[in-house]
Amino acid sequence: MKIVVTVKLVPDTNADKRIDPETKRLVRTGVETVLNPFDEYALEAALQLKEKAGGDTTVTVVTMAPENGKEVVRKALAMGADDAVMLSDPQAEGSDVWGTAHALAKAIAQNGFDLVVCGTQSTDAITGELPGMLAELLGVPGLTYLRKLEIDGTTVRAERETDNGYARISAPLPALASVTKSINEPRYPSLRGIMGAKKKTIAVRTLAEAGVGQEIGNAGARTEVTGFETPPARGKGEVYQAADAVAGAQKILEFLREKKFV
Amino acid sequence: MNLGVPKRDTVRTKAFDPIDPLGLDRDLNSDERLVRDTVRSFVERRILPDIATWFERGEFPKELAREVGELGVLGMHLDGYGCAGASATAYGVACRELEAGDSGLRSFVSVQGSLAMFPVRAYGSEEQREEWLPRMARGEVIGCFGLTEYDFGSDPAGMRTFARRDGGDYVLDGSKAWITSGGIADVALVWARTASDDGPTGTASDGATTRTVPEAGARAESDGNNGGSIRGFIVPAGTRGFSTRNIERKLSLRASVTSELSFDSCRIPARYMLPGARGLRGPLSCLSEARYGIVWGAIGAARACYEAALSYARTREQFGKPIGGFQLTQEKLVNMLLELQKAQLLATQIGRLKDAGTLLPQHVSIGKLNNVREALAICREARTILGASGITLEYPVIRHMNNLESVLTYEGTSEIHTLILGQAITGIAAIT
Ligand SMILES: Cc1cc2nc3c(=O)[nH]c(=O)nc-3n(C[C@H](O)[C@H](O)[C@H](O)COP(=O)(O)OP(=O)(O)OC[C@H]3O[C@@H](n4cnc5c(N)ncnc54)[C@H](O)[C@@H]3O)c2cc1C
């Protein structure tokens, strides 16, 4: 079985973020690049499927990122992915989510796959749209927001998180799955994994090499950022002074009722 | 559905980071940072929740051996035979993060990798390496290192443990003291004196009579008295005539086993001797490896105390404000931070020298002497900031502080490292 995991390289999630008013893009200089934390859950899910399936199951990581992001991709290999494909091309710069999905779909199709696993969203753009688009472009069923993912022969069985519970869903392979943080706790790479990752292959491809014919990047973007604003500061919470514990509990209960939590 | 950003990466890129203001960790390469995150998360998950209890009970849970083996830190700086083959800097980073948990844990890892596995890798036969290293790397086999004796600590050249050749065997007699992991070890690397007629003994100055600072690499070939040679032996636990007794009632390094090893006509085949090590040079080269780990490890213990003191100072209020707002407390915290940063610069440089292959034992002495001394001072200062809370095991501070008393003494006391450096700069040996 061939499993592909899509990963994005994002600016350190703990760093203070800034948007360049000219380009309306996130400033990435001076900030460390890390694996999108959500994608680590996708990789962990894929690695667990591989460990369960055994045999000749492989996990390939696919990303679109500048070539200097190789060291970050290596973390995915250190965690246990078998190899990686990197789409690195100056023409890809400024791609919107459609452009990214389009290019990744080409690269994934070229690589071949039975299952694609994605994280729900990235910590930089946070559109959460990529998995759906990618499934569509690959022409396979898309199972999104999964908190559980299993392969049963040629069927994917999963539990999809909803606002008030979960739904049991299934689909035939090949398919695409996006997983949430509830699905697992991503592993840290072992030291042997970290050292072993040096010997694994990261295939760097241009858009042309990956068979991306269409113009993507800035020029091919179908969406445009027209403006941005800082969200209004969150108001201070309300502080109740309660005479005793019972009165305090009463207040809390009223609040919860008002918000329809109980 | 919880879509909040997962808190996983420990990269710190805030404007002024109170733990690493100069961003010294950014000098680490990506492998080294992965090692850091991996070991740090292991310590947070597996060590910190229980370490106070282990310390209080005076126990080292033996199952940790396999767990750190799985993590890959055992012999991680060695190549082949199931070892990770990491850089010296990566090994240092791992020691730092382990010791931020507890010096006992770091000691276990140092002894296994640098004192037990290293001599097998460096001086063992192919057969010995194959037999022991992969299992030791996995933590299935625990090793210990027996050099010190009750009567010969700083001056191991005087050792009395003797290995007598008898046909195809060696017969060991004598005892070793203060041996980390001795009582839980499956195999002991034991250094013993052999008679001078046991074949070639060392490369250069065997039988030399000049005595210089004993643990300085300078006199490594000299074995002191007798004209015999000091050789290393691999002694499996359970060998008849080999017994251990744990040293109890320690108030330092309690989450680590410290033992006596006794050899009473303990007979082992001659092929258990390490073929490549002759003279004190053998064990001293192992010590140099382990001391290197301490240069980094001490920073971990000190950082943990600094972090505890800083967070306490921010929240503990007296006289109507956080004690971190008083100038005296601020000065303490600032001094701690300065020493931590300096210690890290030293460690990083010593690591780079080791990776470049240009490290001298004296360089390691600079790091060990300075970093352990300063780490201990930081822990003691942190202890004062915590007031009464500082004397309990609810906080890591007094545990680290007590642990570092051992670290100050083992692997060459601070006095011995001072003499090594004194000799290096003046050219005059203090011990004659
Ligand atoms: C917890 C723990 C674990 C240990 N683990 C191991 C182990 O795994 N394997 C092993 O082989 N050993 C181990 N040791 C032993 C350790 O290496 C020795 O304790 C150390 O070398 C000092 O020896 P000593 O205790 O006999 O002190 P001594 O050598 O008796 O020293 C006592 C004091 O005299 C000072 N002194 C000695 N000579 C001089 C001099 N010439 N000039 C000035 N001052 C001097 C010392 O610096 C020290 O302050 C361990 C020790 C401890 C505490």
Image (cartoon, coloured by chain):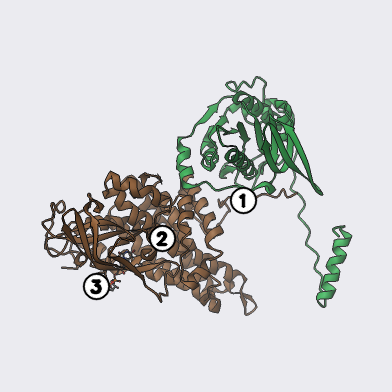
Chain colours: A green, B brown
**What kind of residue is marked 3?**
Asp
**Quarter placement of the N terminus of chain A:** top right
Read off the chain for label 3.
B
Q: Secondary structure at mark 2?
A: helix
Q: Are marks 3 and 1 in contact (CB under 8 Å)?
A: no
CA distance separating discs 3 and 2 = 24 Å
Measured from the top left, where is residue B39 in percent x and y?
50, 53
User: In terms of image quarters, where does ligand 1 lie?
Assistant: bottom left
Q: Secondary structure at mark 1?
A: loop
Please indicate whether residue A226 sits to the left or right of residue B396 in the image.
right
Residue hosting label 2: B108
Residue hosting label 3: B151
Give A13 or B188, whichever is nearer the viewer: B188
Name which of mark 3 and mark 2 comes first in the sequence: 2
Quadrant housing residue B165: bottom left
Determine the residue positioned at 68% across, 29% down.
Answer: A174
Q: Secondary structure at mark 3?
A: loop
Read off the chain for label 2.
B
Is residue A133 shown to the viewer in this render? yes
